[in-house]
Image: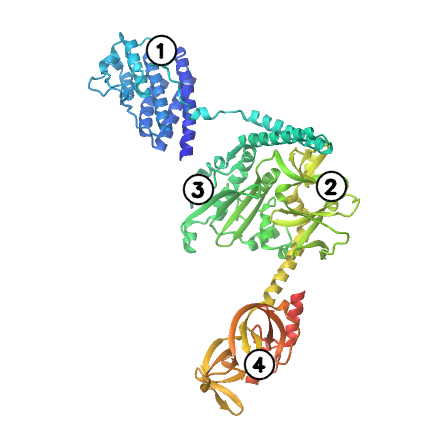
Amino acid sequence: MDEIVHEFLVESYENLDQLDQDLVALESDPSSRALLSSIFRTVHTIKGTSGFLGFGNLEKVSHVGESLLSELRDGERVMDPQVADVLLALVDTLRAILAKVEAGAGDDVDVETMVAQIVAVQEGRAPAEQSAAEEPVAVSPADPAPVEPDAAVDPGPEPERTETDAPVAPVAVKPASVQAPPEPTTSTVPAAAPKHEEIELPGRNAADGSIRVDVDLLDSLVRQVGELVLVRNQFDRIAGAGEDQETKRSAQRLSLIASELQEGVMRTRMQPIEHVWSKMPRIVRDLAKMLGREVRVEMTGGDTELDRSLLEAVKDPLTHLVRNAVDHGIEAPDQRRAVGKASQGLVSLRAYHSNGQVVVEITDDGAGIDPEKVGRSAVSKGLRSANEIAAMSSSEVLDLLFLPGFSTAAKVTNVSGRGVGMDVVRTNIEAIGGSVDVESSVGKGTTWRMRIPLTLAIMPALTVTCCGSVYAIPQVSLLELVALGGQDTRIEHVGTAPVFRLRGTLLPLVSLAEVLDLAPESAGRVIAVVEADDQRFGVIVDRVLNMEEIVVKGLASRLKQIGMYSGATVLGDGGVALILDLPAIARRVLSTEIAELAKVRRQTTVQAAKATHQVLVVAAGDRRVAIPLSAVTRLERIRTDRIEQVGTREVLQYRGALVPLVRLDRVLGAVGGPTGDELDVVVYTRGGRSIAMAVSEILDIVEDDARLHSDIDDHGLVGSTVLDQRVTELLDVRSAVRAADAGFFDDDPDDPDAPDGLTDRAAFDDDLLAGVR
């Protein structure tokens, strides 16, 4: 709110200064319709904004002044000295009230005298005809003598009264000065102290803290700073190659000054994104009303700043995405209620800084986007084949929404359905070095995400060489650099796609020489690990030169058509380097490699999930044994006197049935079985039949990775592993169950009803090999 009030004060002070000039000019040309319209609009603006901000007195006096101006504009009254006096006094009163507001005292000022003067002029009375009973203008506490109302209508002692009233607050002095008979030479002069030494210099107001600068001038300054940065880079290179310490110190000083100047000039072009957002609530309201929907808007991060040129570039894409969220995303109220949602939908706009970029998200809580529907639509329009759609992931299918001519709308309306829009959104955003993507969850909503650079003029970049040419990689996309050895074994292939094993993960590789169709002079020696459009990959280059700030220059149309470059820059030695467009390279070159690698990663993830499971660790005599948790139905502690005999077998009466009991220490040939009056028992149940496995102690439940198993085993085991830094044997649950109840399983070792974890040795070997693969 303080920010809004400050902007209001700055604008109002400027408007009042213009009012002074316009009113004086209007006296010379009373019939000027242009001046009257300009004055009326200015007072009307102050009145409307003051009412919005809750400044009642300011609104009241502005409203009365607006009524008088309306009569002048409509030709009901002519401009004469008396009207000019009272309007100039109105301007002074407005300025005094604004000063009070700026000082934090609000607009608690007596405006009745000013209002009465304007009303008197409207009614054709001279201001002197006011009733003596009317409350005079408030006197400053510094003056103990009250001002008599009649003194204001006596033109004789005016100079003395003016001197006496010098300490009176501005809102009191200005109206009093216009109550003298209408003499243009004196009546329009505001009251002031007669002696020069008694005049107090006015304080600095909000308008004095800012100035208006032409945008073309700012653009010229940015261009000049860009040229200065280029000269700075050249000077740094010259100083670095020489041995003169004085030159090096001068180069460092120039670099510091140029950086500070660059930062200051770039800041003058930065504007909050709320300047663009301010129109969105109206757009959403009108569109929702036309479509018969209920939608509210929430905006977060409106103070996030962008270069003004970028703000202009994102205005249309942002508008289209918001309209798309209301049209395609938010359902009709009855449809929302039918699925348990509130009848009123939500469209939220969020902006924030991330990795040197501004991220703008447009989210709706609507029906979401069904990838299957998108795929069918793409096939029906001939944009993709059914086989291509089947091989795509959900995110790749949703990316088809940005194709030209694509639309999922059932019919063409004046809002959507022609397939024009999303491709233009992506084109416009990529034209400024940004990117746009979409995430959606069916039934929950959709998020459109734009990533925009902070500025297009100057940016830090890494310069590299490839096949004798120099290229620039934007620092915002650079993650790390990896040096390659002569025969680096970490480079492998997934299908035909090269990948690099970096800290246990597979990184897709792109050879810059192959991408640009260049003849490599030697094998690349460095991998620049970059990230673009949420895809991390490595760019193989010959050599890394330097990290420096570069000035972005536009490309000719022919170079733009190549689609691999986002701009060019002039280097310190006068040479030219092309700036790589990494998002475009990722989309054009890595589509097959990323899809292949994603398939391998999904397989690896599934295998890892299969290989990892929870186990129950128990003690069986002097042995530590792991039992798959899927083979554990219950854990019980029973008294040993509950154990009975049936022939040569031990049994328990458990939940109304006789349950066979097997002692794991005897099955495994362990030394020192359970002792005492109580016994820990692991119960396994399947198909209405149960068995109980007696153990010495129940220790813990832990995660077990089958890929770490050893094939060292023994009777009743399927292998061994290390859990909690101790060797633990893996129980062959099937053999243990058969030891308790030989008929528990049928004779088929691959029983499909057997639960996870109940596996024989051959099946375990298959799982182990799959984990290794």
| Mark positioned earlier in the residue sequence (1 or 2) | 1
Q: CA distance from mark 1 to mark 2?
A: 75 Å
Q: Secondary structure at mark 3?
A: helix
In the image as oriented, which residue stretches furthest toward the left?
Answer: 133
In x, y percent, where is residue 447?
Answer: 52, 48
* Lower position in the chain sequence, tag 3 or tag 2: 3
Q: Front-most of 636 and 314?
A: 636
Q: Secondary structure at mark 4?
A: helix
Residue 187 point in image, percent of width and height = 33, 11
Q: Secondary structure at mark 2?
A: strand
Instruction: Give, as a three-letter code, the residue at label 4.
Output: Ala
Instruction: Please state if 589 lies on the left or on the right of 305 as rendered.
Output: right
Q: Which mark is residue 465?
A: 2
**Position above or below: 261 against 588:** above
Disc nearest the viewer among 4 and 3 = 4
Cα distance between the residues tagged 1 and 3: 67 Å
Q: Nearer the viewer, residue 28 or 676?
A: 676
User: Which of the marked residues, 4 or 3, is nearer the chain's N terminus?
Assistant: 3
Indicate the amino acid at tag 2.
Thr
Which residue carries the number 3 mark? 290
Nearest to the observer: residue 648 or residue 145: 145
Mark 4 to mark 3 CA distance (whole Å):
72 Å
- Residue 286 is situated, as x and y percent measured from the top left of the image, at 44, 39
Dot 3 crowding, Cα within 10 Å, few <14, some 14–19, many 20+: few
At label 2, counting other C-alpha atoms closer than 10 Å, the crowd grade (few under 14, some 14-19, many 20 or more) is some
